[in-house]
Image: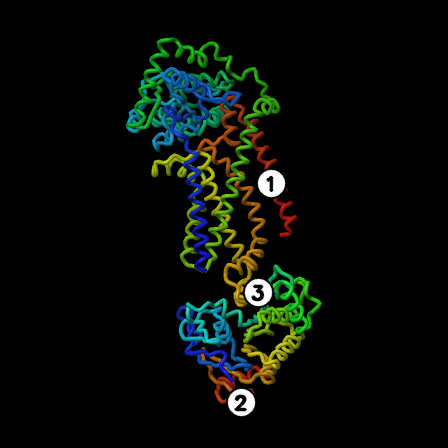
Amino acid sequence: MSTRLKVTDLVKTYGDNEVLKGINLEVQNNEVVVIIGPSGSGKSTLLRTLNKLEAPTSGSIVIDGYDIADPKTDINKVRENIGMVFQHFNLFNNMTVGENIMLAPTELKKSDKTAAEKQAKQLLATVGLEEKFDARVQSLSGGQEQRVAIARALAMNPDIMLFDEPTSALDPEMVGDVLEVMKTLAKQGMTMVVVTHEMGFAKEVADRVIFVDDGNIQEQGTPEEIFDHPKHPRLQDFLNKVLNV
Amino acid sequence: MKRKMWAVLTTLAVFFACLVTFNLSATPAKAETTYTIGTDVTFPPFEFANKQNKYVGIDMDLIRAIAKNQRFKVKIKPVGFNAAVQSVQSGQLDGVIAGMSITKEREATFDFSKPYFTSGVVMAVAKNSKITKLSQLKGKKVAVKTGTSGADYANSIKNKYGFKVVTFDDSNNMYEDVMTGNSAACFEDSPVMRYGIKQGTKLKIVTKPAENGSYGFAVEKGHNQKLLKSFNKGLANLKANGQYKKITEKYLGKDASKDTDSTSDNSFFGLIKQNKSALWSGFKETLWLTVVSIIFATIFGVLVGLMGVFPNKFLNGLSTTLIYIFRGLPLLVLALFIYTGIPSLTGQKIPAFVAGIITLMFNEGAYIAAFVKGGINAVDTGQMEAARSLGLPFGRAMRKVILPQGIRIMVPSFINQFIITLKDTSILSIIGILELTQTGKIIIARNLQGFKVWTIIAIIYLVVITLLTWLSNWVQKRSKL
């Protein structure tokens, strides 16, 4: 097993507000890491610094040998290998479903138009939406939008995928379809970092669960360790709240 | 990212370089002796446009006759009295002949020729008014035209007689104010007043000429002395050979009526028919000004707007500052500053049309920049994040994802701004551009038919704006924005 991602002493502040207080984290190849924690704990910020949507204040983030905290690193090149899925999908409203998926491969000269189209159709098939290639984004349901967003992120053949609360904005009956797609990805060996409130998904799919609170990793371990034998009082408190509704 | 920034800056630089070159090449080459002389737009009988849109009047005939006599050429610029005086001070114009009284104050900044006309200020009241003496003005309002000796005279005696002075920019508005009874009287030079009454202005003169003054031709102090000398020499020659007498009698003497519009058809359609060619060329100038300035304002506005959303603190600040300055300045002030202010700083003349375009480019461009910035900022930030997270550089994410959505938001504002630009061209009449509004002023200066002529001008503006709106809506539909 080799290291895909290594975060060292990561600090992020907004003015006087220290959101991340020195995070250390390693993610191995093919590993699925799920980050849980109360809202405002810094877990989304942590995920967003991993592809520099938020610039780190100090510390280093090394992905595939590139330190993305270093201003000399060509961040666009590194991002091509990192897929990102957002809570609010963020599909491009001015394009069809197919165009959304084909934009990056054609714009960044990874493939020509016919190859990109073929690939887009295949990706849509894997998320169960092959008939939506020409559909307008506005005509999709939330669950469909999120599956297209996953297909779009996969179009650049990334070797790591980041998920920022991918099911939080969905109606409950849509959540299953999206989680199903994510489980399939995990089974195929995709390296994934997932911020989520879906504890069931964490138990079933995660190799490792990380509990973040107050800008620090408070506890981490296998799903059994975290969910069945939580040690940190804050984690016990958090699990009490989310599991016994 | 840096490369993009340079591209923006280079484009700006090239753009300004073009403007400057345009400006230089548009400056008339200094032929042996062609002088550019400024004059007023509305000061009959000294200067006014006749039906053929040619400038005539005592001043005009005189300066042309003197030029012929002394073998130099003149180019007449009817930019208005105030603009003409300022342009001579800033070196934009070589001289000014505009029924200008020689005063001690003015002699501090101008060199005057020998007096070519002696005049005095008279008081005129409405035909049915009972006022005949200055002492009857107590507590009343008195109309004057800005910058005239009539205005100086009124201001010098207003405390003594206890009246209030109301200032107008041209004679017609001043006369109207007295005729409608808003003001009790007006003060004006006697030849001007006499000519106006001959043209059918319903006023009567009730006082003898006071404060006798002399009119002189003026150049900037210490400059153009050769021109001044030629003027004096030519004037003396014309007085000796009888030509001078002929000219003044033509406008003030018994046959003055021959040159008036008294036989003209002053009905609505009659006015349109008579002034067809003047209105048409004013209309074309307005349209041309609008189109050219919309193009420049759009380029400037989009560049400044994009600078405002670029991830660069310096460009953001520059964008905010440019918008703040040019949106904050009244268009009128900006136009006068660029036309008369810049040349006195740089010593480089700017043709009025170019000054007008620059003015509109900055002013309308600032508004465009503001809504371009707003339109882009109105696109959900998630769109940019999604594009960037796929590895698209800022510029391409902007072009492919953000701008197509932002432009859809901006289109109604663009249409609105084009209509505003068209209307704002009328303000450029202040620097003497012969567009529709200025054309209207000139026609009214001759025939004193303010209400009807302004109605015609207003209708023309409305028709053009309607056409522009239709065109914009059609384009909007066609492009499926």
Left or right of A3 on screen, residue A178 = right
Helix, strand or loop under label 1: helix
A130 or A178, which lies in front?
A130
Residue B155 versus residue B347 in the image, above or below: above
Left or right of B266 on screen, residue B155 = left
- Which residue is pictured at 39% across the width and 12% down the height? B244
Q: Which of the labelled discs sits on residue A104, or is there none?
A: 3
The chain letter under disc 2 is A
B389 or B116, which lies in front?
B389
Q: Which of the labelled discs sits on residue A138, or is there none?
A: none
The residue singled out by tag 2 in the image is A225
Measured in 3D between alpha carbons, the distance from the residue under mark 2 to the one under mark 3, in whole angstroms, is 40 Å
- Which residue is pictured at 61% across the width and 35% down the height? B463
Crowd tier of the residue under label 2, counting other residues whose Cα lies within 10 Å: few below 14, some 14–19, many 20 or above: some
Q: Are marks 2 and 3 in contact (CB under 8 Å)?
A: no
Q: Are marks 3 and 1 in contact (CB under 8 Å)?
A: no
A170 or A58, which lies in front?
A58
The residue singled out by tag 1 in the image is B468
Along the polypeptide, which appears first: circle 2 or circle 3? 3
Image spot of residue B234 (x, y percent) = 35, 15
Residue B335 versus residue B62 in the image, above or below: below
Helix, strand or loop under label 3: helix
Residue B476 versus residue B73 in the image, above or below: below
Measured in 3D between alpha carbons, the distance from the residue under mark 1 to the one under mark 2, in whole angstroms, is 71 Å
**Callouts 3 and 1 in the same chain:** no
The chain letter under disc 1 is B
